[in-house]
Image (tube, coloured by chain):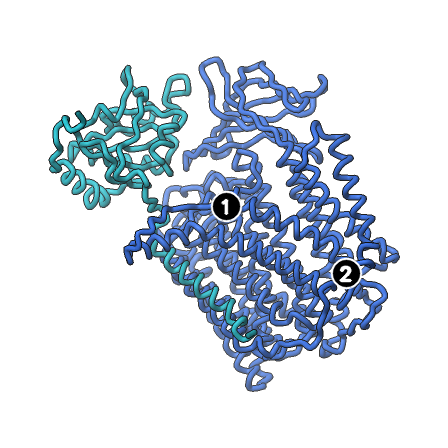
């Protein structure tokens, strides 16, 4: 009896080692979003440069990308060039979600200064100062990017700074595929 | 040139460690005293080489040698000198080198102070530590060489601003001293298992070393919590973050080990269990290193992570822990003891202490690895298409609080009563005759104190105070009942008392700061005031300030009470020039009974108004004060006269052990004092 008991620590350790080994091969940043395959959460936020509000509804019928960024986020700066290149090359609508930033004049306009310095690839920028929309979208860290199809359904989520390789190997092919999807033009809704 | 010398020294240290790991061990089986005698000089040489290597790295930092990649990536010419030194262990490579140097220092101490240990045993202990060093030095040289050269950089990328702080300059060395110190108990355990004989002397040798390592671990954890409190900027002191958990787990097991060693030494029991704890405590230290360095878990504290390094540490971990546990499987059946004890006895008390502490450590481990577990399960799920649909879940503070608080309460009850228990057999009637007094005291204290001093009575406060005063009163009572002059008491007695009282102080701090903490985010324009807990916080605006390597907004807050000025706080919001990272330096007015805490938020509008986080934190200092008291207790116990005596009488130590009489009149076997020898 106690002979088997003695084996317990060793067996527990083997299980633990196996778990850690698996852990190494899993990317901790890979967070499957429960929102994939679901309609993009609605929002109606003020825009950064223009008057009026912006909503995902505005882009219905297009394949577009929601890119979550902030001027305080260091990795966003690394990603920014990639996003700019991505927009230029593939003519994608990238909607910026300026997340918990000091975007408005009242707060010091850090976001605008940042864009003035690094360029503005976004078609529109939604200002989410208190981060509520971020919560709806399940934002886990900044930067994050979502791909939304023509029906307004989230098809893909990328956590962390995008690299050229991610764009070329994942985002661009996905967007081309989604663009090719045939969508019944309004009407089913009745 | 100097960095190359450092690297050479590192490689030589590796070769010496291989020698140390192999030759004395081999000699101990062949009975070759020449081989065994090699251990000591090898340890000295290893230590000299590593110190030299470490010195070279420090030199590279002090001279701003940005042709060394590690220096270029963690330092900057504008960094203040103190932080240039602490930047040496500010990132992965350097902290590993520090780990190696500390391991070597512990080995050196064992070699120097372990003269009373029989040659065979000492040779094996030093050899085991040498083997651990081989693993770490290989890891440094193969995957994380701090001396790697790159083309000369104009300037360095600077130390992470979070780490530019005095608290964090000393926190990692302390913590490493604790982590690595547990390798001594581990080496003793493995050496004893190799020998196949676990005598009582073994426990006696291992005790002071375990105590000292535990002291460093305690202080290291406390420093980390203190740093998080003032530097992370939001006034929390424990986050159940993976990195914090990684230090708490070895602490819990080391605490169990300290107590279990008492039983093994005094009664020759729990032998296998004690060995297992010694292996477990060090294994958890290694696991902590793995978790922090491999990037399998994301944490607010982890700065560098790399899966390749992770794989290396994992293989190392498997070799070290796996082989020692396998050894345990074969040797543990030999470690039997004929002694027995009853359900109500000191042995049983210490056993329940051990079980509670180990369960706590397991609960922390489970909570820490939970995200990994769900990840792994979802991979299995996908591979075999089971359709379980497991999401990524991490368990947060609610889980840890729900488990740790009740276990902590149980532990406290046992802690108090356990001190008075007699070896082998005790009776309920005798025990209750002793314990009613501290119980009454603590009930009175817990009800009266909040009624008199607290703004409102809170059931949680009362509960927390019952527990902490129970621990404190029982410890005091236990010492008073020994009816001896304070100077005649042994170090272990003082140590046990201070250890328990320190924990009581920490528990008091936790209870009071959790219940009575007030926290408010307010918008204040210059000249406006905010009142909290009877204090007036007057905001006098913000001005720009230039630091050595940062620019800052510095606010001024005058705090007064009944029109008497209490303190002027100058919280800052810094932007470090190189890493352009905003950092909050909170303004804190510290006091024994309360801290006043102000952190700058954001500027609001053009009128000079800012958002401020104002906090009133009663008794928060007690958290760390308790840790200092515990540490002092651990030191006193470690330097007990008996161990010093032990060193002088260099004889087989088993003869030193006095068997406790079957019916001890005074249940104070820990009070062994010098006289008993």
Q: Chain of mark 1?
A: B
Q: Quadrant of residue A133?
A: top left
- Say if A127 sits above or below B52 in the image: above
Mark seen at residue B222? none
- Say if A2 sits above or below B390 in the image: below
Which mark is nearer the camera, 1 or 2?
Answer: 2
Q: Is residue A17 left or right of residue B662?
A: left
Q: Is residue B391 left or right of residue B39?
A: left
Nearest to the observer: residue B2 or residue B556: B556
In the picture of the structure, the residue carrying the numbered disc 2 is B421
Residue at horizontal 77 percent and vertical 30 percent from the top: B452
Q: Residues within 10 Å of mark 2 (few under 14, many from 20)?
A: many
Q: Where residue B55 sits: x, y (%)?
A: 52, 56
Nearest to the observer: residue B191 or residue B31: B191
Q: Where residue B650 sits: x, y (%)?
A: 73, 76
Q: Residues within 10 Å of mark 1 (few under 14, many from 20)?
A: some
Report which colour depicts chain A: cyan
Report which colour depicts chain B: blue
Callout 1: helix, strand or loop? loop
In the picture of the structure, the residue carrying the numbered disc 1 is B241
Residue at horizontal 80 percent and vertical 54 percent from the top: B432
Q: Where residue B32 sits: x, y (%)?
A: 57, 85
Looking at the figure, which quarter contains the N terminus of chain B?
bottom left
Residue at horizontal 31 percent and vertical 37 percent from the top: A144
Please count the marks in the image: 2
Q: Quadrant of residue B360?
A: bottom right
Looking at the figure, which quarter contains the C terminus of chain B?
bottom right
């Amino acid at each position: 009896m106690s002979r088997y008991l003695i084996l317990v620590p060793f067996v527990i350790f083997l299980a633990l080692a196996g778990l850690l080994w698996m852990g190494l091969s899993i990317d901790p940043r890979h967070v499957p979003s429960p929102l994939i395959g679901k309609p993009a959460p609605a929002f109606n936020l003020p825009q950064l440069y223009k008057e009026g509000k912006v909503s995902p509804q505005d882009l219905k019928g297009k394949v577009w990308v929601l890119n979550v960024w902030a001027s305080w986020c260091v990795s966003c700066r690394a990603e920014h060039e990639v996003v700019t290149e991505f927009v230029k090359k593939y003519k994608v609508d990238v909607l910026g979600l300026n997340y918990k930033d000091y975007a408005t004049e009242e707060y010091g306009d850090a976001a605008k200064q940042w864009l003035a310095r690094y360029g503005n690839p976004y078609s529109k920028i939604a200002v989410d100062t208190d981060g509520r929309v971020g919560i709806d979208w399940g934002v886990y860290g900044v930067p994050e990017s979502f791909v939304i199809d023509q029906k307004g359904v989230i098809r893909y989520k990328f956590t962390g700074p995008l690299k050229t390789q991610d764009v070329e190997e994942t985002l661009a092919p996905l967007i081309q595929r989604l663009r090719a999807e045939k969508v019944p033009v309004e009407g089913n809704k009745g | 040139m100097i960095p190359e010398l450092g690297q050479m020294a590192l490689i030589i240290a590796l070769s010496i460690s291989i020698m140390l790991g192999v030759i004395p061990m081999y000699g101990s089986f062949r009975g070759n005293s020449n081989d065994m005698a090699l251990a000591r000089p090898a340890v000295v040489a290893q230590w000299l080489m590593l110190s030299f290597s470490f010195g070279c790295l420090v030199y590279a930092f002090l001279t701003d040698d940005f042709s060394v990649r590690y220096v270029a990536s963690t330092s900057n010419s504008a960094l203040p000198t103190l932080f240039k030194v602490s930047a040496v262990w500010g990132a992965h490579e350097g902290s590993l080198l520090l780990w190696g140097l500390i391991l070597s220092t512990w080995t050196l101490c064992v070699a120097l102070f372990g003269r009373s240990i029989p040659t065979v045993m000492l040779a094996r202990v030093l050899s085991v530590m040498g083997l651990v060093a081989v693993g770490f030095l290989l890891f440094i040289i193969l995957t994380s060489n701090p001396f790697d050269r790159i083309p000369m950089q104009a300037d360095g990328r600077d130390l992470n601003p979070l780490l530019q702080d005095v608290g964090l300059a000393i926190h990692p060395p302390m913590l490493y001293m604790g982590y690595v110190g547990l390798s001594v108990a581990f080496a003793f355990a493995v050496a004893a298992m190799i020998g196949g004989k676990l005598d009582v002397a073994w426990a006696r040798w291992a005790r002071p070393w375990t105590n000292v390592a535990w002291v460093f671990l305690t202080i290291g954890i406390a420093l980390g919590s203190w740093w998080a409190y003032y530097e992370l900027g939001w006034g929390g002191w424990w986050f159940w973050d993976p990195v914090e958990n990684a230090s708490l787990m070895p602490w819990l097991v080391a605490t169990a080990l300290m107590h279990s060693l008492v039983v093994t030494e005094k009664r020759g029991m729990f032998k296998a269990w004690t060995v297992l704890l010694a292996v477990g405590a060090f294994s958890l230290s290694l696991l902590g290193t793995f978790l922090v360095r491999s990037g399998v878990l994301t944490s607010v504290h982890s700065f560098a992570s790399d899966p390749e390094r992770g794989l290396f540490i994992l293989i190392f971990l498997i070799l070290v822990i796996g082989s020692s546990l396998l050894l345990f499987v074969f040797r543990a059946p030999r470690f039997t003891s004929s002694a027995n004890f009853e359900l109500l006895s000191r042995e049983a008390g210490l056993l329940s202490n051990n079980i509670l502490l180990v369960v706590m450590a397991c609960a922390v481990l489970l909570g820490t690895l939970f995200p990994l577990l769900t990840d792994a399960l979802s991979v299995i799920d996908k591979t075999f298409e089971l359709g379980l649909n497991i999401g990524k879940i991490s368990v947060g503070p609610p889980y840890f609080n729900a488990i740790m608080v009740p276990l902590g309460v149980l532990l406290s009850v046992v802690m108090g009563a356990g001190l008075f228990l007699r070896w082998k057999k005790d009776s309920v009637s005798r025990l209750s005759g002793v314990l009613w007094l501290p119980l009454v005291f603590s009930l009175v204290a817990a009800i009266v104190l909040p009624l008199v001093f607290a703004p409102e009575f809170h059931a949680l406060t009362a509960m927390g105070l019952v527990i902490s005063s129970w621990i404190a009163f029982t410890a005091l009572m236990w010492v008073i009942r020994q009816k001896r002059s304070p100077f005649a008491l042994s170090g272990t007695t003082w140590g046990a008392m201070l250890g328990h009282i320190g924990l009581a102080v920490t528990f008091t701090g936790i209870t009071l700061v959790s219940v009575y903490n007030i926290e408010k985010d307010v918008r204040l324009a210059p000249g406006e005031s905010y009142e909290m807990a009877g204090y007036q916080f007057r905001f006098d605006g913000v001005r720009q300030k230039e630091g050595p390597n940062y620019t800052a907004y510095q606010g001024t807050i005058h705090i007064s009470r009944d029109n008497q000025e209490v303190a002027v706080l100058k919280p800052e919001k810094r932007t470090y020039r190189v890493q352009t990272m905003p950092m909050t330096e909170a303004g804190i007015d510290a006091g024994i009974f309360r801290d006043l805490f102000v952190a700058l938020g954001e500027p609001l509008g053009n009128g000079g108004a800012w958002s401020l986080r104002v906090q009133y934190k009663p008794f928060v200092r007690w958290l760390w004060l308790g840790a200092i008291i515990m540490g002092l207790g651990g030191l006193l116990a470690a330097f007990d006269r008996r161990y010093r005596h032990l060193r002088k009488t260099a004889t087989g130590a088993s003869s030193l052990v006095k068997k406790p009489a079957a019916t001890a009149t005074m249940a104070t076997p820990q009070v062994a004092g010098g006289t008993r020898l």
